[in-house]
């Protein structure tokens, strides 16, 4: 169901939710299609759904990279694709997970924990001179977290890629 977009700046990315058969080679076929057509994948996340027969791919494509209609038409031609829907970032809930290893002397750890508090992050592992931390939030908030931790010294970063679902209709009042 496509609802009219709410006011605001146009999205920089197309977020596609693609339901596919959970079979070997499906991801390779989707990635190959993007590569052959020259579409740039900004982010890709894949996982099985609650039904083991299917997986959901969340593919984020730069708006400048390709016309959305063309991408959808090409994806729809793939045998293992069951359904495709665009998730307008203004009408969907988006999340991403980040793991960061940050330099952290014992005297710096309180400062890092204060930053993590602002972003609902937490410490996962403590080393002699480093911490591994995590947070999950909207991708732009994770960018802000990285910037806030940069002065401490980021040793390593791993992000999962964006996942998204449509926003729910509000519950009736009363």
Image (spheres, rainbow, N blue to C red):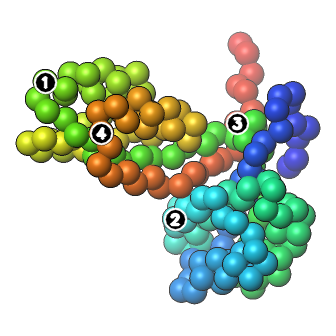
- How many neighbours does mark 4 have within 10 angstroms: few (below 14), some (14-19), or many (20 or more)? few
Report the residue at 35% width, 48% height from top.
Answer: 99
In depth, the one of 52 and 17 nearer the eye is: 17
Where is residue 123 drawn, in percent x and y? Answer: 25, 37
- Depth-wise, is mark 1 or mark 2 nearer the camera? 1
- Depth-wise, is mark 4 or mark 2 nearer the camera? 4
Q: Quadrant of residue 122?
A: top left
Q: Which residue is mark 2?
A: 47
Q: CA distance from mark 1 to mark 4?
A: 14 Å
Q: CA distance from mark 1 to mark 2?
A: 40 Å
Q: Secondary structure at mark 4?
A: loop
Q: Which residue is mark 4?
A: 153
Q: Which mark is residue 107?
A: 1
Q: CA distance from mark 3 to mark 2?
A: 21 Å
Where is residue 148 drawn, in percent x and y? Answer: 41, 29
Report the residue at 73% width, 27% height from top.
Answer: 170
- Depth-wise, is mark 3 or mark 2 nearer the camera? 2
Tell me which numbered mark, 3 or 1, is placed earlier along the sequence.
1
**Is residue 87 shown above or below 114?**
below
Q: CA distance from mark 3 to mark 4?
A: 39 Å
Q: Given contact means CB atoms under 8 Å apart, are the residues at marks 3 and 2 in contact?
A: no
- Depth-wise, is mark 3 or mark 1 nearer the camera? 1
Tell me which numbered mark, 4 or 2, is placed earlier along the sequence.
2
Asked whether the viewer can see residue 137, the reply is: no
Q: Which mark is residue 168?
A: 3
Give left or right: position of 156 versus 88: left
């Amino acid at each position: 169901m496509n609802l009219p977009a709410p006011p605001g700046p146009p999205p920089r990315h197309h977020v596609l939710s693609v339901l596919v058969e959970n079979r070997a080679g499906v991801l390779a076929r989707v990635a190959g299609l993007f590569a052959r057509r020259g579409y740039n994948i900004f982010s890709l996340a894949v996982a099985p759904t609650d039904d083991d027969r299917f997986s959901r791919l969340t593919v984020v494509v730069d708006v400048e990279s390709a016309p959305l209609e063309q991408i959808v038409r090409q994806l729809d031609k793939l045998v293992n694709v069951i359904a495709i829907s665009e998730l307008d970032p203004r009408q969907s809930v988006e999340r991403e997970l980040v793991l960061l290893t940050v330099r952290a002397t014992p005297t710096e750890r309180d400062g890092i924990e204060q930053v993590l508090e602002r972003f609902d992050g937490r410490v996962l592992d403590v080393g002699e001179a480093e911490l591994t931390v995590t947070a999950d939030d909207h991708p732009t908030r994770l960018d802000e977290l990285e910037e806030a931790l940069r002065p401490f010294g980021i040793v390593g970063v791993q992000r999962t890629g964006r996942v998204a679902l449509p926003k729910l209709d509000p519950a009736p009042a009363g």
